[in-house]
Image: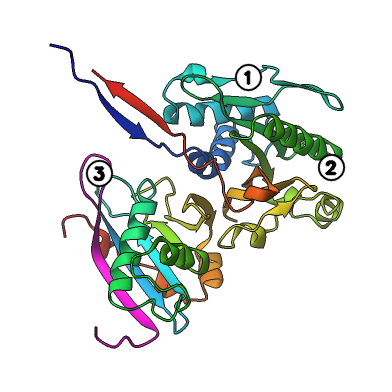
Amino acid sequence: MPNVTFPYEEEFRRFAYPGISRKGQCYLKVRVNQEGRAVFLCAQLLNYTGTSVTNAVEDIFVGVVEELANKGVFNNLSRRNWFKKSPQLELEVARTCRWIEHYPPGAGFAPNGSYALVSFDKNLSPAWNYMDLARAATICEVDQEFLRVAPDELRHGS
Amino acid sequence: MAAKTRSQRFKPLIVEPLAKALSIKVAAANTELNMSPDEHQAELVVQAMMRTLLQPHIPCPTLITENEKVLDDPDLGGLIPDLIVKRVGGGYWGFFELKTMLKSDQLTVDDVERDLKKLSAYKQAHPGAAPIFILVGTWTKLFSTNRLTSWSRLPIRYQLDQFQTTPPAPQALNDNFVAIPAGSFAIEELAIACFMWEIQTRAESTVRLSATYDFTAAMT
């Protein structure tokens, strides 16, 4: 396993997940600090008609955590209960991370786009809290730029 | 030959569509009438909007009912939730109590206290159901110093930091129950904000039941 350097950043231009009737896709970006605390930006694609990032949030979360865990990104997070791919790891990431769900202008209900903090409970059951970009950046302790994605990056099929 | 039955489990979201759309719907309804977005709407009108928003996510519209007594409480009397969502095949999915704090509303702390007691009573009687308190209000009223001061008597708080933590931090109602932040819409460019709490027992204070409406549909 290659050494991971922190802060770890990765962009998944198209992250695949199991949708309701067919596979879904979204844009994902993650930054993980030395302690293993992660900030995720999960964005809905433009001109996309598959299962939304909202409806598939648990699947996307579990999928990306597993992928990052396989790369050793969360090795510093749960040393005491370290079992690769274990539900404990997912819960620990859910407890410590910030998951921001983003709909760009043209993809959701808000003309200027929307940002929501999704918080997971002990059963990974999600709750959505819609807020301004500035507020989302503050609570995630990132620059607003981290939470902005150019529309061209989000065009489905590009 | 007997027909094969295929059943599939569905989990449509319930609280998310309400959190996302209720504030916008109230503001839009006011704008349609050439009123300011935070203008008063009678609580019953907002309740009807909730029903409209919930219906596409519930398998049958008759599973949502209003004006139905669900409980006789020795202290509170006959209890009628604002909205009731039933499960397919019987039983309750959840109960909604709504309070509005729009331009002309005179919501008192006692009104909220009573709703929280009602919701706790529902939870006591129906532990598998999700009792939910919804507050819809204008930024100006919700966050005025006077309002925040009087509201500080209540066990639930809607200051933004309460809804922006992971995992959601339960707010203690009494010795037996907590209110868990279950969703919110607070974007300053819209005059209306919305906050939701799910009532849970203290023993289950890290678990919310209200995110989805789980049901199985069988097709032959």
Q: Residue furthest top?
A: B1
Residue located beneath label 2 in the image: B109
Q: How far from the left and from the top, in percent, is residue A72?
A: 32, 78
| Percent coordinates x, y for residue A147 in the rendering | 41, 68
Residue, disc 1: B66
Left or right of B133 on screen, residue A30? left
Quadrant of the rendering where the N terminus of chain B is positioned: top left
Residue A28 lies in the magenta-colored region:
no
Please tell me which residue is depicted at 54% across the width and 41% down the height of the picture: B209
Looking at this view, is B125 or A23 the one in front?
B125
Disc 3 marks a residue whose amino acid type is Thr
Distance from disc 3 to disc 1, alpha carbons, whole Å, reads: 35 Å
Q: Which residue is mark 3?
A: A49
Identify the secondary structure beneath mark 3. Answer: loop
**C-alpha gap between disc 1 and disc 2:** 24 Å
Q: Magenta segment range?
A: A1-24
